[in-house]
Image (tube, rainbow, N blue to C red):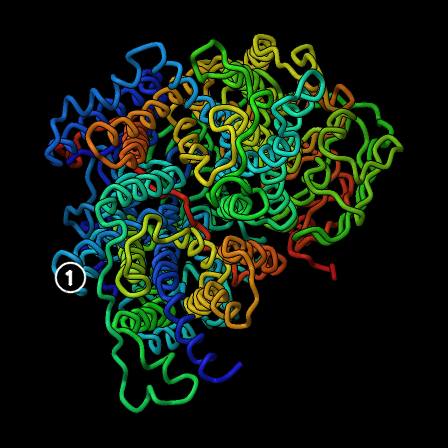
């Protein structure tokens, strides 16, 4: 019988090896899955993982998709460092979308110029952040003041945010000239974020996301606050003994996450989507959770993991177009990846060993 | 409000609350053993789609319900595999289950979107179902709902009245002590995690076989998550879990009442009410959180490993 | 009954034999080929310093740990004990130092849980009969969380007796008891042994072992040192066996000049603490005794600032700081060392450098605005390690990999590097090896010589009497008067700990 024995020291090599193993196992499972579905596995896998990034445009689309993931993951990594299980990046993202869209629509005019244009964009971005902050602040308030589990409250707020968005696009923010589709009016060009290069949809938000990721990474890894968050996550009583303000840290981590997720929402509305629709998020807030685990909360790791997750989103859409497979296959891959990672992580702290019966020493 | 409307409302509320109640009971048995599985939404979705697909293909509701139970238990076993032998973080494992379950459900269900099923027929109990007001609600329901009540009764009695229930709460309260007393903690936790997930799967099947036998994506609309909150609100007691679930069932059909009253409220805002109510209830009950009886099982969500 | 023949047979067939039992955790040999033999009706002591491997051996015997080698003979037959259930089936009962009771359940449910073969009526009957013999007044319906430590222990012993055990293992049973409770316990145990029950009595307190036991097996550093009949062995011989050498006696205490009053405390109700009033002066060590759970944790936290409130007055250098948070108190020179060195005093998964930062994050060359200079932190942590000769560790070693004694040395060094004016510590030498113990005592004395006040909360009465200038004790949350050592005898201390003469 094989059982796990605790290693004397965590295996550093496994920290890196585990995500790679998980990725490999996911691919193998994918091949098996496609074969079972009667699809030629290799062409499907190619369409999933290779085709989307064959050319520069494909790569730029990948960066575009990765932008909200990076922002949400950067924020979540602060929370998870302190073991604050904020599952609400999705809701914070959606409320960011809603607030940003509402603010930008107030400025919606194709002839905006100069300061007015700047004000419009700033209002859109600011309102997005404010929306995320509000939603994350609610989670912090409920945990701090009422001692409610942040897992449950953040999930509930996800649904509330989704329904608020639906209500807005069906009601007050619906485009009066939109043939009764549940969508807001399109935002005028001056309000949209400039693309990095002509002909591509990747916008300056990606640069901002990278900057924020690096900044949060520095906060987490190099500052006293990052250290405090880590101690709080490891042991609340040690944090109390050290004299860290746990309430303050809770607010800080959640608000940091809310601001980042809200900004991600604003980037989507003011970026590729350009209006409010019911389908603004493809589950970025949830996928970002996987990004944090996969990237181990390290900025570089999370960057790679976000690109990989973005690839599954685009690959899923690609499969839908080319093979008529449902695009939810992306979610299956994401779930599988996390499963395999969690399983492979066991090898960091434990090593498999054959179970030996008690050795009897002759008298 | 006339008595017919009241009877109809009660009837509908019981039907609406049953999937939630089944799922919450599943959460309850697992959490009493100290297992915190956040993947309920994924399990429930898988239960719903399995129940629907199997019933549609075989024409048998029973086969559908049983398949949903089996798939639920399988998802539970996956969770057990990750958290017990592989000692993965239970929070992350539950989330992975939620993501994976909803992805797989959407994948499997994509072929069924829009197709419908003959829902499980009502089995009215003669004479009793003629009673005013409560007759229709209590005695003219489908067999699956009666089965759910029987399960609830059985679970309640087992948890609160038997030696097994005592051992279970020992495992959930203090697995270290339970282990030293000779209880086999890990098999117990594994079994309860699977049983709980099976119940959640059945809850999903109730949705797709009886409550709304028409396949849509996101059939559960967050009931799995709400069930987790219900158990917290109910203080981990069976009776309260049922009460809370059915109260929520009632609130979720309020729009019927509102339409009847001639109020027009945006359906989007109305569908927000369960979540807002849930938050409100969490806040309201937090002030009583200090009563020890309402506390979560002492070792909820903590991994336990035999030393040595 | 106990005929000569029976006794003869008993002497040839011991109830329990452990042969060359080995158990290792990682690289640490907790038990290295230990042998032991217990006869029917014998009270056998298992002696050794903290960390000698006593508890590990007993957990192997009770099936909690699987041994890596060796064999177990029960009534002459070789057995394997895969779990506590199997141990109980054989007739082995164990009362752990950390009680094996589920706090939220009542006494009856706890008994039912462990005794599946008994009906409720039978449990009730036996409980009443045995409860009377052990003088346990608690009712079956009482919740365990509401019982005192002594009552819980009696519930545990009673539970073992209800299961008809032939061997009762008691792990440091008197450490949670007041002296009269301990005396009553020993009376009860003697009666049990006369009935034929064998008892394994784990302790490091020689006095009670000499009073109670027939033979003693001594362990040191995970190894078997010897088994001796207590009637023929002097205390000095036992001590030599336990610690391996005669320890250098404590360094002569440099008499510090009577310092001025540093701190005046008047604490009200806080958790289990009800009332405490005392003062501390520079250059003195004040010791507070008491059994576990009599409010000593709360007392420590009220001084460190982890707990604070309007009901508590604390004047430090003439400044009222009752409401000041931990960090401000640390800046004033108040430092503390909590009981739980793993999880509170140190975070096991973090490196020693990071653990150094835990209580040195307020100021210092390594703090640069929001940034931490980790190289500098590492250098300071190394300094703490070097100053206390902690080998085999660098500042990057996770704290969890240090032995209890080394970790505690590091923590003492860490706090002393902060140059405290008041150091409050709780059981600082609990569970550490003798060398670390004397090193830690030396550190406390040095701090004292440098003019700091030391508050020592300890369950070890010997430690209190050998180190302290003034003594007091806590009982049920009430602090006795704190008097100079010359005016306090161990008897007075015992009275204080039992609340004698206190409302």
Residue that sits furthest to the bottom in the current view? B127
Residue at image x 22%, y 57%? Answer: B51
Asked whether, in this view, residue C387 is left or right of residue C74, the answer is right
The image shows a total of numbered marks equal to 1
Mark 1, other Cα within 10 Å: few <14 / some 14–19 / many ≥20:
some
Q: Quadrant of the N terminus of chain A?
A: top left
Q: Which residue is nearer to you in this view: C460 or A306?
A: A306
Report which quarter residue C329 is drawn in. Answer: top right
Find residue A133 and report its horizontal and vertical position in percent: 62, 35
Residue at image x 61%, y 10%? Answer: C373
Give the structural element (helix, strand or loop) at label 1. helix
Q: Quadrant of the C terminus of chain A?
A: top left
Query: Label 1: chain?
Result: B
Asked whether, in this view, residue A324 is left or right of residue B223, the answer is left
Report which quarter residue A215 is drawn in. Answer: top right
Q: Is residue A221 visible?
A: no
Find residue C14 and report its horizontal and vertical position in percent: 22, 50
Q: Which residue is nearer to you in this view: B147 or C138?
A: B147
Please say if C329 is above or below B100.
above
Residue at numbered disc 1: B63
Please say if B299 is above or below A74.
below
Residue at image x 53%, y 59%? Answer: C145
Q: Which residue is nearer to you in this view: C120 or B114?
A: B114
Find residue B30 and report its horizontal and vertical position in percent: 35, 55
Q: Is residue B52 visible?
A: yes
Please say if B139 is above or below C242.
below
Find residue B202 and report its horizontal and vertical position in percent: 27, 60
């Amino acid at each position: 019988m094989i059982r796990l024995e605790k290693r004397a020291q965590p295996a550093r090599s496994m920290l890196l090896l585990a995500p790679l193993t998980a990725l490999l196992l996911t691919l193998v499972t994918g091949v098996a899955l496609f074969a079972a579905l009667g699809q030629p596995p290799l062409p499907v896998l190619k369409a999933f993982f290779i085709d989307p990034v064959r050319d520069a445009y494909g790569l730029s689309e990948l960066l575009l998709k990765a932008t909200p993931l990076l922002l949400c993951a950067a924020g979540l990594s602060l929370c998870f460092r302190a073991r604050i299980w904020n599952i609400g990046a999705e809701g914070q993202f959606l409320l960011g979308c809603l607030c940003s869209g509402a603010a930008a629509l107030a400025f919606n005019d194709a002839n905006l110029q100069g300061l007015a244009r700047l004000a419009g964009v700033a209002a859109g971005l600011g309102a997005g952040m404010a929306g995320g902050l509000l939603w994350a602040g609610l989670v912090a308030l409920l945990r701090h003041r009422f001692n409610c589990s942040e897992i449950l409250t953040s999930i509930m707020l996800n649904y509330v945010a989704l329904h608020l968005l639906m209500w807005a696009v069906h009601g007050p923010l619906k485009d009066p000239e939109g043939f009764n589709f549940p969508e807001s009016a399109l935002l005028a060009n001056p309000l949209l974020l400039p693309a990095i290069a002509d002909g591509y949809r990747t916008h300056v938000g990606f640069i901002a996301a990278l900057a924020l990721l690096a900044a949060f990474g520095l906060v987490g890894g190099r500052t006293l606050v990052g250290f405090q968050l880590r101690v709080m996550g490891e042991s609340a009583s040690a944090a109390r003994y050290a004299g860290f303000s746990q309430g303050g840290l809770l607010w800080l981590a959640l608000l940091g996450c809310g601001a980042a997720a809200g900004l991600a929402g604003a980037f989507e509305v003011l970026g590729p989507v350009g209006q409010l629709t019911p389908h603004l998020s493809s589950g970025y807030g949830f996928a970002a959770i996987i990004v944090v685990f996969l990237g181990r909360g390290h900025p570089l790791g999370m960057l790679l993991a976000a690109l990989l997750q973005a690839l599954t989103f685009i690959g899923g859409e690609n499969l839908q177009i080319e093979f008529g497979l449902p695009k939810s296959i992306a979610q299956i891959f994401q779930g599988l990846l996390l499963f395999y990672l969690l399983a492979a992580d066991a090898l960091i702290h434990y090593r498999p060993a054959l179970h030996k019966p008690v050795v009897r020493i002759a008298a | 409000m006339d008595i017919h409307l009241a009877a109809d409302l009660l009837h509908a509320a019981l039907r609406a609350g049953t999937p939630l109640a089944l799922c919450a009971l599943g959460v309850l048995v697992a959490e009493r053993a100290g297992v915190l599985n956040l993947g309920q939404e994924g399990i429930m979705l898988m239960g719903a789609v399995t129940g629907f697909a199997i019933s549609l293909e075989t024409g048998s509701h029973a086969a559908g319900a049983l398949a949903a139970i089996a798939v639920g238990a399988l998802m539970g076993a996956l969770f057990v595999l990750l958290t017990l032998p592989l000692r993965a973080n239970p929070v992350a494992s539950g989330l992975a289950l939620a993501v994976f379950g909803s992805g797989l459900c959407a994948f499997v269900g994509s072929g069924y979107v829009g197709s419908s099923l003959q829902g499980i027929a009502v089995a009215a109990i003669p004479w009793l179902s003629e009673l005013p007001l409560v007759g229709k609600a209590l005695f003219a329901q489908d067999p699956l709902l009666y089965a759910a009540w029987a399960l609830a009764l059985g679970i309640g009695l087992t948890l609160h009245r038997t030696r097994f229930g005592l051992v279970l709460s020992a495992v959930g309260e203090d697995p270290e002590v339970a282990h030293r007393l000779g209880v086999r903690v890990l098999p117990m936790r594994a079994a309860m995690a699977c049983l709980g997930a099976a119940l959640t799967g059945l809850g999903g099947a109730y949705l797709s076989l009886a409550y709304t036998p028409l396949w849509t994506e996101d059939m559960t609309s967050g009931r799995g998550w709400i069930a987790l909150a219900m158990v917290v609100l109910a203080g981990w007691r069976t009776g309260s879990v049922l009460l809370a679930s059915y109260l929520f069932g009632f609130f979720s059909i309020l729009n019927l009442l509102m339409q009847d009253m001639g109020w027009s409220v945006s359906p989007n805002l109305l569908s927000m009410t369960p979540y807002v109510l849930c938050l409100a209830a969490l806040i309201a009950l937090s002030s009583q959180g200090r009563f020890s009886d309402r506390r979560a099982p002492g070792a909820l969500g903590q991994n336990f490993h035999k030393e040595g | 009954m106990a005929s000569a023949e029976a006794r003869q047979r008993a002497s040839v067939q011991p109830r329990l034999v452990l042969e060359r039992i080995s158990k290792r955790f990682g690289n640490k040999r907790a038990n290295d080929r230990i042998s032991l033999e217990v006869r029917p009706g014998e009270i056998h002591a298992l002696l050794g310093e903290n960390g000698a491997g006593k508890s590990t051996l007993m957990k192997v015997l009770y099936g909690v740990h699987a041994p890596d080698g060796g064999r177990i003979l029960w009534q002459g037959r070789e057995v394997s004990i895969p779990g506590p259930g199997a141990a109980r089936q054989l007739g082995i009962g164990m009362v752990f130092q950390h009680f094996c009771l589920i706090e939220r359940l009542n006494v009856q449910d706890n008994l039912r849980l462990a005794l599946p073969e008994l009906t409720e009526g039978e449990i009730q009957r036996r409980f009443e009969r045995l409860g009377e013999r052990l003088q346990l007044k608690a009712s079956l319906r009482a919740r365990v969380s509401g019982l005192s430590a002594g009552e819980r222990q009696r519930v545990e012993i009673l539970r073992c007796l209800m299961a008809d055990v032939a061997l009762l293992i008691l792990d440091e049973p008197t450490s949670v008891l007041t002296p009269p409770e301990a005396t009553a316990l020993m009376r009860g145990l003697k009666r049990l042994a006369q009935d034929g029950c064998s008892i394994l009595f784990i302790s490091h307190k020689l006095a009670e072992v000499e009073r109670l036991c027939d033979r003693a097996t001594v362990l040191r550093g995970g190894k078997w040192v010897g088994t001796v009949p207590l009637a023929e062995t002097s205390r000095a011989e036992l001590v030599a066996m336990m610690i391996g050498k005669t320890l250098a006696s404590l360094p002569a205490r440099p008499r510090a000049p009577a310092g001025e009053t540093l701190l005046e405390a008047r604490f009200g109700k806080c958790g289990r603490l009800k009332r405490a009033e005392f003062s501390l002066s520079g250059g003195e060590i004040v010791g507070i005794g008491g059994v576990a759970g009599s409010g000593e944790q709360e007392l420590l936290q009220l001084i460190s600032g982890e707990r604070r409130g309007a009901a508590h007055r604390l004047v430090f250098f003439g400044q009222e700081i009752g409401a000041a948070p931990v960090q401000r108190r640390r800046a004033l020179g108040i430092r503390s060392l909590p009981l739980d060195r793993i999880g509170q005093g140190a975070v096991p998964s973090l490196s020693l450098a990071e653990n150094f930062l835990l209580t040195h994050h307020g100021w210092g060359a390594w703090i640069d605005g929001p940034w931490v200079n980790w190289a500098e932190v590492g250098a300071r942590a190394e300094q703490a390690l070097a100053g206390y000769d902690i080998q085999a560790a660098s500042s990057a070693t996770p704290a969890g990999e240090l032995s209890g004694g080394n970790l505690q040395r590091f923590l003492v060094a860490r706090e002393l590097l902060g140059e405290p004016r008041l150091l409050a510590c709780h059981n600082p030498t609990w569970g550490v090896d003798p060398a670390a113990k004397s090193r830690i005592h030396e550190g406390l004395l040095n701090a004292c010589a440098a003019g700091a006040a030391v508050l020592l909360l300890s369950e070890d009465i010997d430690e209190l009497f050998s180190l302290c200038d003034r003594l007091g004790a806590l009982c049920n949350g009430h602090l006795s008067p704190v008097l100079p050592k010359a005016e306090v005898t161990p008897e007075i201390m015992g009275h204080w700990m039992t609340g004698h003469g206190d409302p």
